[in-house]
């Protein structure tokens, strides 16, 4: 069978008995140690790290030499995997897993819902004589068959067409989680369409490898393995489990639909990098151990800017494996938090007026051990670096709307542009030195490299050190940070496959255009032609470069003048997914065909509309059942108090009590009015059949109505008795002990 990474148009009768793989393996070789028995502590990181992963080291130890070599040919070179080899691998993997305590296996995949999915099958195989053996075949390793109708597909499959296939991805190591052997897989339909997020990502990685090698060949370099690397900085909130259980909005939607600002927020800037709460620290220690055992190179952990907000950052590795590891990290965060009486919130904006949570995507391209984004000591003379830099600038400008679309979600819309995250406008930050080089190339004038200056701290015992030529810009959506680009727009709940698929494919297009233009040109002529190409391309796309404050209102005006897109909502961002230029881009490199693109567009639209519908329903119910009764009860108490004093013959004016009562009664009226507006907007949405039109309505009518309802309720929280307010406030949620 053709690999699912290639275009497959034939019907089901052409499906193979087993899969051929053209997947690629990358990354660090991990050291595996035997698992210790229960009760024996594994104190050394080296003992813990990778102990629950069937990695390359373990394969080499447990597989016959010939089998190991054949498997590595599949992994590294895309050679077909023989079923006999798969049987040997499956047996070794099963024996290893059972030794580690595993009883079941699962094909672990990423449907279009964005989460991970798994169905557990036991190794148990009854013999018919009252006994049982354990079995796991090469066929079971290579191919699974989940119910494809149970997952979103955007119209690719009819409801009654249930058959789908999962295919082993040997480039992402199998691992053991909760006594289950998890086998990372791709997921496709009965007729071969990709139904997951992994498959197009792998296709895009193959595309960028091919085109990068074409460019490197022009520089006289032999073909080599090219990988894109990713480091995912995961931000999240931890709150008390007891408070969480009393917040129906958090439980149902992942964010607080109501909540007045706390008495103290983040204005003192004391939380960032501050001392970690003991309870949180215990959670982080358990999380580290779990992740290390799964081979996830979790390295940096700290408090983030907002109260109760934190971050975990791993060492970067190949994009495919890094994304698998990030999804596993997110799952472990959610599950382990309960061990410590906490709940992990991964919504992009769980608290209004408080910093939301992102997931910075640190992206680079490596050829062997060389980082192709490393400028070297003299970037102005590094022609290869300038070519790759130019291609990045071109592809980000050319496909800026696609990049914005790749991170679009109902949750992330609340975060982007909120003076805490990049704006919805895509731009590139290069820093002073690279920006000066671009100016020199475009303006055709000489460039003098900035010298690195030694900084003296003025204290004898403190050493002086060299400062960087370029500062960092935390407001930029796409910032160069020394030898990589930090894409800061993805939200904390995102599956990074989407944005990296777009980045890789767009970059492959720019590299292809360069290779097409200069193939056949050699020697001094090549250098001159390359420089001319760079100048022309930079002049055409330098509008995307912006080194200033992305939060400044002036930038929005300047971006409009430059002709940059500013799609503030998911509804505004999604249509570009089915532009003709998008269809041609992904079709040219075999990443997604038109049907697969349109299906993903429909899935994203449907998910957006469903989430807004759920949020609206929760708001209405909480308003009627939770908030209005509490406010009315408090108003009644105030009224009864006034009447009691009056009946007792008090002559005090009770001006403040009467003013409070008036505010409460006026607030109740405003709440009812806003509630009616939300109900109307929701009723109108249900009458709209077209999903894009419904998304437009939800973005520009429903959400503003919901915001107004929130404002009216939040105004009442501030003046209602704390004892009567029915849910934990922001003060409680964010500043727990």
Image (tube, rainbow, N blue to C red):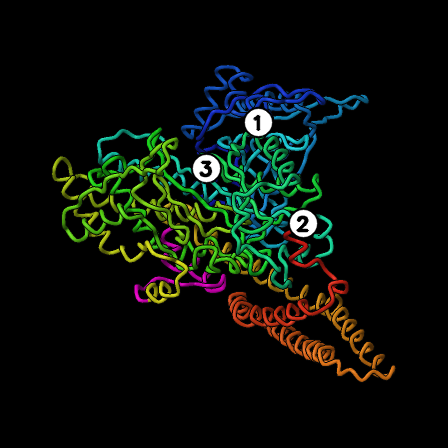
Q: Alpha-carbon distance for marks 3 and 2? A: 55 Å
Q: Is residue 389 left or right of residue 58?
A: left
List the residue tagged with mark 3.
Answer: 2
Q: Nearer the viewer, mark 1 or mark 3?
A: 1
Q: Residue furthest left?
A: 524
Of residue 104 and residue 457, the one placed in the foreground of this image is 457
**Which residue is label 2 attached to?**
736
Judged from the image, the secondary structure of the residue bearing numbered disc 1 is: strand
**C-alpha gap between disc 2 and disc 1:** 37 Å
Relative vertical location of residue 47 with respect to residue 268 in this rendering, above or below: above
Dot 2 falls on a residue whose secondary structure is: loop
**For residue 648: magenta?**
no
**2 or 1: tag closer to the N-terminus:** 1
Label 3 or label 2, whichever comes before in sequence order: 3
Q: Residues within 10 Å of mark 1 (few under 14, many from 20)?
A: many
Number of the front mark, 2 or 1: 2
Residue appearing at x 56%, y 17% in the figure:
62
Is 574 on the left-hand or right-hand side of 240?
Answer: left
> Mark 1 — residue?
53
Locate residue 17, reporting x and y percent.
55, 33
3 or 2: mark nearer the eye:
2
Res. 195 visible in picture: no
- Coordinates of residue 322 in the picture (x, y in percent): 49, 37
Furthest toward the right, the residue is: 648
Main SS, magenta residues: helix
Magenta residues (range): 561-585
Q: Residue at x 58, y 70 (%)?
A: 702
Q: Is residue 49 above or below residue 533?
A: above
Q: Quadrant of residue 208?
A: top left
N-terminal label among 1 and 3: 3
């Amino acid at each position: 069978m053709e690999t699912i990474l290639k275009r497959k148009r034939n019907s089901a009768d052409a499906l193979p008995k087993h899969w051929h793989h053209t997947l690629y393996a990358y990354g660090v070789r991990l050291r595996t140690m035997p698992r210790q028995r229960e009760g024996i502590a594994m104190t050394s990181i080296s003992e813990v790290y990778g102990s629950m992963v069937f990695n390359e080291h373990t394969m080499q130890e447990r597989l016959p030499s010939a089998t190991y070599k054949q498997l590595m040919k599949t992994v590294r070179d895309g050679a077909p995997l023989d079923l006999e080899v798969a049987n040997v691998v499956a047996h070794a993997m099963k024996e290893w897993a059972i030794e580690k305590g595993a009883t079941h296996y699962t094909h672990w995949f990423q449907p279009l819902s964005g989460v991970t999915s798994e169905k557990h099958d036991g190794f148990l195989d009854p013999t018919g004589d009252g006994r049982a053996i354990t079995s796991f075949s090469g066929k079971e390793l290579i191919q699974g068959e989940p119910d494809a109708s149970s997952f979103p597909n955007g119209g690719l499959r009819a409801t009654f067409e249930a058959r789908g296939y999962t295919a082993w991805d040997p480039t992402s190591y199998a691992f053991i989680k909760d006594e289950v052997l998890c086998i990372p897989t791709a997921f496709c339909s009965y007729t071969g369409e990709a139904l997951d997020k992994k498959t197009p990502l792998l296709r895009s990685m193959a595309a960028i490898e091919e085109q990068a090698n074409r460019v490197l060949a022009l520089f006289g370099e032999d073909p080599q393995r090219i990988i894109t690397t990713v480091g995912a900085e995961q931000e999240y909130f931890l709150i008390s489990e007891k408070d969480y259980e009393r917040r129906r909005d958090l439980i149902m939607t992942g964010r607080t639909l109501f909540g007045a600002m706390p008495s103290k927020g983040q204005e003192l800037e004391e939380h960032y990098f501050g001392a970690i709460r003991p309870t949180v620290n215990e959670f982080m220690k358990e999380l580290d151990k779990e992740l290390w055992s799964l081979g996830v190179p979790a390295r940096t952990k700290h408090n983030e800017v907002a109260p109760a907000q934190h971050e975990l950052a791993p060492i970067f590795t190949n994009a495919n494996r890094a994304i698998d590891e990030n999804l596993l990290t997110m799952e472990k965060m959610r599950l382990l938090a309960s061990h410590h009486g906490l709940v992990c919130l991964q919504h992009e904006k769980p608290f209004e007026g408080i910093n939301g949570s992102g997931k910075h995507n640190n992206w680079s391209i490596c050829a062997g051990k060389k980082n192709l984004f490393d400028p070297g000591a003299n970037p102005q003379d590094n022609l290869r670096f300038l070519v790759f830099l130019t291609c990045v600038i071109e592809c980000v400008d050319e496909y800026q709307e696609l990049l914005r679309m790749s991170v679009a979600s109902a949750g992330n819309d609340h975060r982007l542009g909120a003076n805490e995250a990049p704006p919805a406008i895509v731009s590139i930050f290069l820093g002073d030195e690279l920006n000066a080089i671009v100016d020199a190339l475009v303006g055709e004038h000489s460039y003098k490299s900035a010298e690195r200056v030694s900084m003296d701290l003025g204290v004898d015992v403190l050493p002086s050190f060299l400062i960087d030529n370029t500062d960092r810009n935390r407001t930029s959506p796409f910032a160069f940070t020394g030898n990589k680009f930090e894409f800061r727009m993805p939200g904390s709940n995102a599956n990074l496959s989407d944005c990296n698929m777009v980045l890789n494919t767009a970059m492959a297009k720019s590299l292809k255009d360069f290779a097409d233009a200069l193939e056949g040109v050699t020697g001094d002529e090549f250098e001159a032609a390359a420089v001319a190409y760079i100048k022309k391309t930079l002049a055409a796309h330098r509008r995307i470069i912006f080194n200033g404050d992305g939060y400044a209102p002036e930038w929005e005006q300047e971006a409009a003048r430059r002709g940059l897109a500013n799609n503030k909502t998911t509804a505004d961002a999604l249509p570009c997914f089915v532009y003709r230029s998008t269809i041609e881009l992904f079709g040219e490199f075999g990443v997604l065909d038109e049907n697969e693109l349109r299906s993903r567009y429909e899935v994203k639209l449907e998910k957006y509309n469903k989430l807004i519908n759920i949020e609206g329903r929760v708001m209405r119910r909480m308003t009627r059942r939770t908030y209005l009764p509490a406010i009315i009860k408090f108003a009644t108490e105030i009224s009864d108090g006034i009447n009691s004093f009056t009946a007792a013959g008090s002559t005090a004016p009770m001006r403040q009590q009467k003013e409070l009562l008036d505010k409460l009664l006026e607030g109740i009226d405003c709440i009812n009015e806003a509630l009616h507006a939300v109900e109307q907007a929701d009723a109108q949405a249900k009458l709209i059949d077209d999903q894009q039109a419904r998304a437009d309505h939800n973005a520009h009518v429903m959400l503003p109505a919901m915001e107004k309802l929130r404002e009216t309720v939040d105004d009442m929280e501030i003046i209602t008795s704390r004892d009567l307010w029915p849910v934990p406030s922001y003060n409680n949620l964010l500043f727990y002990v």
